[in-house]
Image (spheres, rainbow, N blue to C red):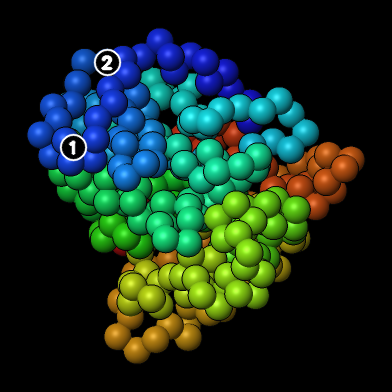
Amino acid sequence: MIEDNTVIHKYQNITIKYDQLDTLRLPVTEPFVLTVEWDGVKYEFLIRIKENSPHLLVFGAGGINPVGPRVGPPYFQRHSWMNDFEDSVIYYNDPTLYLGDILAGWGQGTKDRFYLKDIATILTKLIQKIQINPKNVLFYGSSGGGFMSLILAGFIKDSIALVDCPQTCITRWFFKPVVQSVLNVSYPNLSEQEVTKLFPERIDVIKFYNHIKYVPKIYYLQNVTCIHDVNNHLIPFISNLKYMDEGCVVNKVKVDLYYDKQPGHKDFPELAGHGALGKKETIDYINHVKNLQF
């Protein structure tokens, strides 16, 4: 999905330090871009607040198309959908994209800082400011954005993750050069084996849930025509849920399989079927899942 990210510059831009976040008054009339500078890292959010809506939708971005024009950062995938929702919406950029010439960052950050944890901390403050009950917060993303949504929903208890063809373990993603590039910028001088040993909870969603002793509510969409996704991400994820450590709180996980024969690019046949559902179908799912009680 290619979108013109230059349009975000038409919105009001607010830049603050992290310690100013608690006293910030959020605009409620128009969308705005919020940049939170936190110990040398820029965390960027595109925000539209609807005062009368009890729901908040939080969107994460998948990888940048390897065969199309480069977009961002900041990369706010699906930002053009903003006005299709009657809910408050937040799009977040992954600052890992600033660390090097990479197509996806999966929120990895650096050895010293897990950027997804920082994003969750900032989002928690924003959720409180908007006065949204965490039970009414929905994280949506596909592919790498799905991975980040699964992690963020774990950090923000009671929220729900709606994901479409996500990665559930970064190192099992078929596109090895993209995986290696983010490992190189986030964990320089460490091998893949060393990274997975030192930071398993950043790489594998199941290991993250075991680490925090909590599995969030998840609505998992999967196109069955993408055999790689099914065999390397869906099946291992579902299979390993039954082996969660004792004392781990496990919420319900719903899996919805669909068949959508999508063509793959000639250079990346494994991507056939990996593209997310279209706009209308995705919006229908978001509007359905946000109201589910499970």
Q: Compared to 65, does 168 lie above or below?
A: below
Q: Which residue is drawn at 46% across and 26% down?
A: 79
Q: Quadrant of residue 155?
A: bottom left
Give the number of callouts: 2
- In this view, the residue in front, 249 or 144, is 144
Q: Earlier in the sequence, mark 2 or mark 1?
A: 1
In the rendered image, residue 135, in percent from the top left (x then y), is placed at 23, 53
Q: What residue type is labelled 2?
A: Glu
In the rendered image, residue 19, in percent from the top left (x then y), is placed at 18, 41
Q: Compared to 186, does 210 lie above or below?
A: below
Residue at numbered disc 1: 21
- Check disc 2 and report its element: helix, strand or loop: loop
Residue 275 visible in rendering: yes
Q: Residue at x 24, y 35 (%)?
A: 17
Q: Compared to 10, does 191 lie above or below?
A: below
Q: What residue type is labelled 1?
A: Leu
Q: Which residue is drawn at 52% across and 61% down?
A: 255
Residue at numbered disc 2: 30
In the rendered image, residue 109, in percent from the top left (x then y), is placed at 48, 52
Q: Quadrant of residue 35?
A: top left
- In this view, the residue in front, 75 or 156, is 75
Give the label on residue 159, or none. Answer: none
- Give the CA distance from mark 2 to mark 1: 19 Å
